[in-house]
Image (cartoon, grey):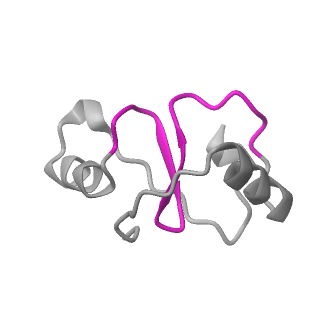
């Protein structure tokens, strides 16, 4: 769903937690990921768990994420 909705300038990085990849586990710990899927945009967790809304990239969508999911915990930058 995220792949379909991302704009051309967005970069999608998927980390497979089931594979027990050390890099994926390290990044999940840095972001304090508690559930999967978790969606991180610009270094901030925006959605935890399966989204229940259409994923269409743009300013309106980002504003909706900020209002519906105002997670304020500090996050490590996405690499």
Q: Residue at x 62, y 45 (%)?
A: 69
* Magenta segment includes 50: yes
Q: Residue at x 68, y 55 (%)?
A: 66
Residue extending farthest to the left is 22
Query: Which of the 4 quarters of the picture holds residue 26?
Result: bottom left
Q: Is residue 15 visible?
A: yes
Q: Position of residue 45 (x, y in %)?
A: 49, 52
Q: Is residue 23 above or below residue 39?
A: below
Q: Residue at x 56, y 65 (%)?
A: 11
Q: Position of residue 59 (x, y in %)?
A: 81, 65
Give the magenta range.
Answer: 33-55
* Magenta segment includes 52: yes
Helix, strand or loop: magenta stretch = loop
Q: Residue at x 64, y 47 (%)?
A: 3
Quadrant of the snapshot with the N terminus? top right
Between residue 43 and residue 17, name the one nearer to us. Answer: 43
Query: Which of the 4 quarters of the picture holds residue 54?
Result: top right
> 29 left or right of 72?
left
Q: Position of residue 17 (x, y in %)?
A: 28, 36
Query: Which of the 4 quarters of the picture holds residue 33?
Result: top left
Between residue 8 and residue 53, name the one nearer to us. Answer: 53
Q: Position of residue 50 (x, y in %)?
A: 56, 28
């Amino acid at each position: 769903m995220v792949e379909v909705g991302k704009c051309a300038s967005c970069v999608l990085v998927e980390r497979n937690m089931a594979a027990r990849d050390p890099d994926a586990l390290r990044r999940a710990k840095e972001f304090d990921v508690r559930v999967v899927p978790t969606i991180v945009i610009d270094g901030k967790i925006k959605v935890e768990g399966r989204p229940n809304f259409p994923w269409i990239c743009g300013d309106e969508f980002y504003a909706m994420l900020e209002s519906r999911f105002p997670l304020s915990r500090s996050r490590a930058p996405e690499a």
